[in-house]
Image (spheres, rainbow, N blue to C red):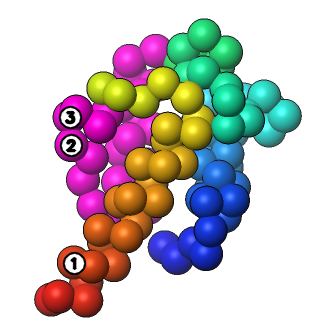
Amino acid sequence: MNTESPQDTFGVVREIMVRLFDLESSQISLQAKLVDDLDLDSIDAVDMIVEIQSKTGTRVNEEAFQNLRTISDVVELMDVMLKEGQIKAASD
């Protein structure tokens, strides 16, 4: 997966959230809280992480997973994972 900017990553995250959790696209903003605003539970969070790992080709560490609170956090994490995946691919 190749995204050019955090805005591109936001679009991918939005698409994942809409598809996995039957949310409206308009509900998903960078400030949206995963639990309070989008009503995601721990199982939903695991499903989201599995999908992100699939898209990025890298694994989420437990600490990063536990620190996700907003869509912005998810976008930032996905950007980091994409960069790590590119670095790993370049070094292989």
Above or below, 71 against 11 in this view is above
Describe residue 62's horizontal placement relative to residue 9 as left or right: left
**Lower sequence index among marks 1 and 2:** 2
Dot 1: within a 10 Å radius of its alpha carbon, few (fewer than 14), some, or many (20 or more) residues?
few
Task: State which quarter of the image contains the C terminus.
Answer: bottom left
User: Badge 1 is on which residue?
Assistant: 88
Magenta segment includes 57: yes
Describe residue 17's horizontal placement relative to residue 75 as left or right: right
Above or below, 34 against 55 in this view is above
Residue 61, which numbered label? Answer: 2
**Lower sequence index among marks 1 and 3:** 3
- The residue stretch that appears in magenta: 41-65
Q: Is residue 54 visible?
A: no
Query: Rounded to the nearest whole Å, what is the CA distance between mark 3 and mark 2?
Result: 4 Å
Magenta stretch, main secondary structure class: helix
Dot 2: within a 10 Å radius of its alpha carbon, few (fewer than 14), some, or many (20 or more) residues?
few
Q: Picture coordinates of residue 23 (x, y %)?
A: 72, 29
Please identify the quarter of the rendering in which residue 17 is found. Answer: top right
Query: Rounded to the nearest whole Å, what is the CA distance between mark 1 and mark 3?
Result: 20 Å
Q: Picture coordinates of residue 25 (x, y %)?
A: 80, 38
Q: Residue at x 62, y 68 (%)?
A: 5
Q: Do tag 3 and tag 2 residues touch (Cβ < 8 Å)?
A: yes
Identity, as a three-letter code, of the amino acid under mark 1: Lys
Residue most extreme to the right = 26
Above or below, 83 against 71 in this view is below
User: Badge 3 is on which residue?
Assistant: 62
